[in-house]
Image (tube, helix red, strand yellow):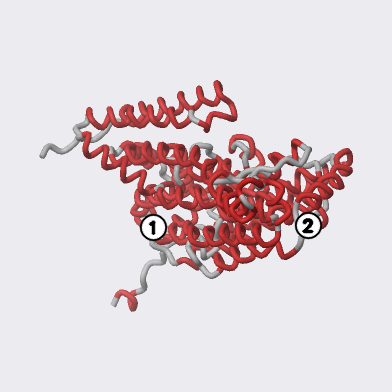
Amino acid sequence: MKQPKQPSFLDAFVPITVLVCLLGAAVYLYGDSSSSGPNQIALLFATFTAALVGLKNGYTWKTLEEAMIKGITLSLGAILILLMVGALIGTWLLSGTVPTLIYYGLQIISPSWFYAASCMICGIVAMSIGSSWTTAATIGVALLGVATGLGLDQVVTAGAVISGAYFGDKLSPLSETTNLAPAVAGSDLFEHIQHMLWTTVPSFVIALIIFTFMGFSADVNSDIGRIEEIVTILKGNFNINPVMLVPLLVLLGLAFKKMPAFPAISIGAVVGAVWAMLFQGDLIHSQVDASQGEVVGYFKLVWATFYEGFSITTGDGKMDDLLSGGGMSNMLNTTWLVMTALMFGAIMEKTGLLDIFVRSILKIAKSTGSLIAATIATCIGTNIVAADQYIAIVVPGRMFKEEYKKRGLKPVNLSRTLEDGGTITSPLIPWNTCGAYMQSVLLINPFDYALYAFFNLINPVLAVIYAYLGIKILRIKPKSMSEQA
């Protein structure tokens, strides 16, 4: 069987150029709605372009098709979680869990400290459960509601939520990416976490300082009166009680016990549905079709909440938007985006087009600083091209591992760099699986909140500065004569 030809730099450049041009056109023509179809079409055309390059170089269509299918299968776990998160948001709105979080948040959190507090709360929760996704879909959604009540900027709040969620996720031993990076690089998990503290903690502190300054600078006086209106609407439509927080506590407990995300979120959604039937009888009764019978109507409404979400009419349009949403069907657009993005990434990796860029980078990465900077740039580039944070950790990790070893650098340098560049930049890209997910639950375009995800922006820059200054760059100690013997 004839071996495929090695691709040229031009081969790799063509599909990337097509993708960048089409994505740029999609954003220009469709704005915030570009992720509702235009981006997916751009990714499909870029995939076909990469496939044509592969065919030119001797790959068979069957091989390329198998690669695309494999790429899609990599997304199935994320898709299952996405669908169940949609169900969870719907049932938690109906059960009063999210409204109760918003209600107590309005009572407790001071507007001046709100951005910093949101960042810190999400950081603590994500570190406890090891999941930025779960944190954003639960605590993050509620904090956006509180921001509305306080008259604060939802886009800045989303940036604070993302910053905190990814800080906690990055340092949690329960996180998948925190385990994946040292596994790829060949370092120890807890050494990896300890080494990450040097870049992660200062970045988070700087982000908290910025959020604190922004909170005290925010003008919220004109919106304070709005809080009473929101509190009245919440109490008038929902049974607000600390007991409504039980579904959240159940989910956090399951995550802390290391139950996988899909069954944990599924149980959380079911508990939310049960809580709705137990404690939100008046609300359900007001939405039930009386001709169907009360019991059947109750059951049908709760069942529908899983797949089409929850909708309420309070007489206040902004509150209707805030308290309505969720449902598996509302996640299908994100699912489409994830699948097309991973198809493109799979073709680029299979045909060796991603490897072309890495080899070109290594030719100019002469110093340790430039090597680490090149690794971070490759992780970010892979997040853009392959559209998945796991690929952005695994592919650069495999490609740079021997180079780090050859230069006498400990594996923890590579594992930390993979997280500094790969894990935390993924939610900043709208067509990345993480960016698409965050947009689907927070309902804010990553291009908007990316400007305020200060931790995610600062961390890679600080990592590059450390690299060039030689701060906490650990080297392999040569073995002594006795150890060699």
Q: Which mark is residue 184?
A: 1
Q: Nearer the viewer, mark 1 or mark 2?
A: 2
Q: Residue at x 70, y 56 (%)?
A: 281
Q: Which mark is residue 360?
A: none
10 Å neighbourhood of mark 1: few (<14), some, or many (≥20)?
Answer: some
Where residue 198 appears, as percent x and y from the top left, is: 58, 59
Q: Is residue 359 visible?
A: no
**Amino acid type, label 1:** Val
Q: Residue at x 53, y 63 (%)?
A: 193
Circle 2 residue? 104
Q: With respect to residue 118, does 221 lie above or below? A: above
- Asked whether 435 or 229 is in front, the reply is 229
| Element under disc 1 | helix
Q: Residue at x 41, y 44 (%)?
A: 366
Q: Residue at x 59, y 45 (%)?
A: 309
Q: With respect to residue 372, does 175 lie above or below? A: below
| Element under disc 2 | helix
- Asked whether 79 or 65 is in front, the reply is 79
The number of discs equals 2
Q: Is residue 95 left or right of residue 61?
A: right
Where residue 311 appears, as percent x and y from the top left, is: 66, 43
Where is residue 359, by image quadrant? top left
Q: Earlier in the sequence, mark 1 or mark 2?
A: 2
Q: With respect to residue 481, does 127 lie above or below? A: above
Asked if the residue at tag 2 contacts the one at tag 1, i.e. Cβ–Cβ closer than 8 Å, the answer is: no
Q: CA distance from mark 1 to mark 2?
A: 43 Å
Q: Quadrant of the N terminus?
A: top left
**Amino acid type, label 2:** Tyr
